[in-house]
């Protein structure tokens, strides 16, 4: 039905737009033409584009729900077609590619979750490597020049080695080369976990990376930050034969961060003296004899010790203190006294005991795991120059292709005030360097 109000509006429009008197027949004819045009417009079927625009602007509730359901279904189909493992694999691939192309790399290795058994590693392309052990040994190498500087901070000594040792001790043992050769795909996706406010995705490799082998590897798990796609930490489990299980944790991984180049300086620090070279006329040979260093298995050890710092001349007093304390507990030592030395600010002395006892501070009950160790026995009085003994010892360990992995340990039998010939066993946990 025609809209009367619309007709009135049209008449008013014609009157406003007409500035002169118009004959009645012209006005009627114009009004008729306008009515015909309006009727055609109102009766014309809307185009597809117009229909779509109208439907999107004026959606009824039912249609809104239908479109939302279709969108959810579309997302679900996408998740099925692109599984979570595939997306997670892309995160691992990005982290591996970043490590492979890294120009600098830093990280810390903690052995068996004990913070004092830690090694800081640094790598700087091309060919510079460094590691610093928490027990006072540091090695710096330039594998391009085939030169390596070994520092013994506890005794303020150094040793400069050539190409063979530089390649075996720092370059091969350094896990930087293994991290920088990760395959583009992991063997297994472990899932997700949150740590330090970061979402991490875990991956497992069934074997060590191509550029290095890990003897007795049981698992190598890499956790990657899902946001930055950078490696966060690595957990390695090792067990050789029937030996105890050992854990290695690679933490504080930093890729392409600025590194102070002075860390790789191969100039011995001021105040350090060179370890005497082996030979018939060397001081080390005179003080230590042949000093045959053997690599073998060391049994596990439970002991009561007292933590110490300051001069090593306090060793006798420390042992007397532990021995007196054990007597008050009615406990007989299960072996010879010993000392373990990281530095003058961190060392301990005590006696082996049977497992299962309890002690109170300042005494501590420690448990040393069984494992590979280097050892040598110095018969007779120890002498005044401890540095000569340990300098020759560490040099022999390195020349045999092994890497120290723990603090120096001395085990004493007999003594100057007792009958019998005194002797000292030098011992240090080690690992194969290649």
Image (spheres, rainbow, N blue to C red):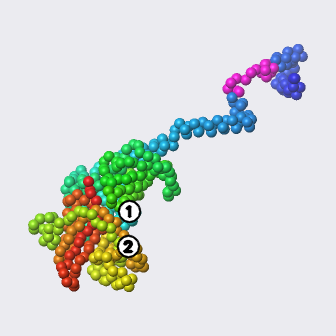
Residue 264 % position (x, y): 29, 58
Vertical comparison of 247 with 386: above or below: above
Q: Residues within 10 Å of mark 1 (few under 14, many from 20)?
A: some
Q: Report the number of numbered marks.
A: 2
Quarter containing the C terminus: bottom left
Q: Which residues are magenta?
A: 37-51
Tell me the residue that label 1 is attached to.
112
Residue 114 % position (x, y): 39, 65
Residue 200: in sight, yes or no? yes
Main secondary structure along the magenta-highlighted residues:
helix
Residue 125 % position (x, y): 31, 50
Q: Residue at x 20, y 78 (%)?
A: 422
Q: Under tag 2, what secondary structure?
A: loop
Between 330 and 145, the residue placed more toward the observer is: 330
Q: Under tag 1, what secondary structure?
A: loop
Specify whether 228 is left or right of 268: right
Q: Residue at x 82, y 17 (%)?
A: 36
Residue 283: in sight, yes or no? no
Vertical comparison of 327 with 2: above or below: below
Q: Residue furthest left?
A: 280
Front disc: 2 or 1: 2
Residue 394 % position (x, y): 23, 65
Res. 355 mark? 2
Specify whether 156 is left or right of 87: left
């Amino acid at each position: 039905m025609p809209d009367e109000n619309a007709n009135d509006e049209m008449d008013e429009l014609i009157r406003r737009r007409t500035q002169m008197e118009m004959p009645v027949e012209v006005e009627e004819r114009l009004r008729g033409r306008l009515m015909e045009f309006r009727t055609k417009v109102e009766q014309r079927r809307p185009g597809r584009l117009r229909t779509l625009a109208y439907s999107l602007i004026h959606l009824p509730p039912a249609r809104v729900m239908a479109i939302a359901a279709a969108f959810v279904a579309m997302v679900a189909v996408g998740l099925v077609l692109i599984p979570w493992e595939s997306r997670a694999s892309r995160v691992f691939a990005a982290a591996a590619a970043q490590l492979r192309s890294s120009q600098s790399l830093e990280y810390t290795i903690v052995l068996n979750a004990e913070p004092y058994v830690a090694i800081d590693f640094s790598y700087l392309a091309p060919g510079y490597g460094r590691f610093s052990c928490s027990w006072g040994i540091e090695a710096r190498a330039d594998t391009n020049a085939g030169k390596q500087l070994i520092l013994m901070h506890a005794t303020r000594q150094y040793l400069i080695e050539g190409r063979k040792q530089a390649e075996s001790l720092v370059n091969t043992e350094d896990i930087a080369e293994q991290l920088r050769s990760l395959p583009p795909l992991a063997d297994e996706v472990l899932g997700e976990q949150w740590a330090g406010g970061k979402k991490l995705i875990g991956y497992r490799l069934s074997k060590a990376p191509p550029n290095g082998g890990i003897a007795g590897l049981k698992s190598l798990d890499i956790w990657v930050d899902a946001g930055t796609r950078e490696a966060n930490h690595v957990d390695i489990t090792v067990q050789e034969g029937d030996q105890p299980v050992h854990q290695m944790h690679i933490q504080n991984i930093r890729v392409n961060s600025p590194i102070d180049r002075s860390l790789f300086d191969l100039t011995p620090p001021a105040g350090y003296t060179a370890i005497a070279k082996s030979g018939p006329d060397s001081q080390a040979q005179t003080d230590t004899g042949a000093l045959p260093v053997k690599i073998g298995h060391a049994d596990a050890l439970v002991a009561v010790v007292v933590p110490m710092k300051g001069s090593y001349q306090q060793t006798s007093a420390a042992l007397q203190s532990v021995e007196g304390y054990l007597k008050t507990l009615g406990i007989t030592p299960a072996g010879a006294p010993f000392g373990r030395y990281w530095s003058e600010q961190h060392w301990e002395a005590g006696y082996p005991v049977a497992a299962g006892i309890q002690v109170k501070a300042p005494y501590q009950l420690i448990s040393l795991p069984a494992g590979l160790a280097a050892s040598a026995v110095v018969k007779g009085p120890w002498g005044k120059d401890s540095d000569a003994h340990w300098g020759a010892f560490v040099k022999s360990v390195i020349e045999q292709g092994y890497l120290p992995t723990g603090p120096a340990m001395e085990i004493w039998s007999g003594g100057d005030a007792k009958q019998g010939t005194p002797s000292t066993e030098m011992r240090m946990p080690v690992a194969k360097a290649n």
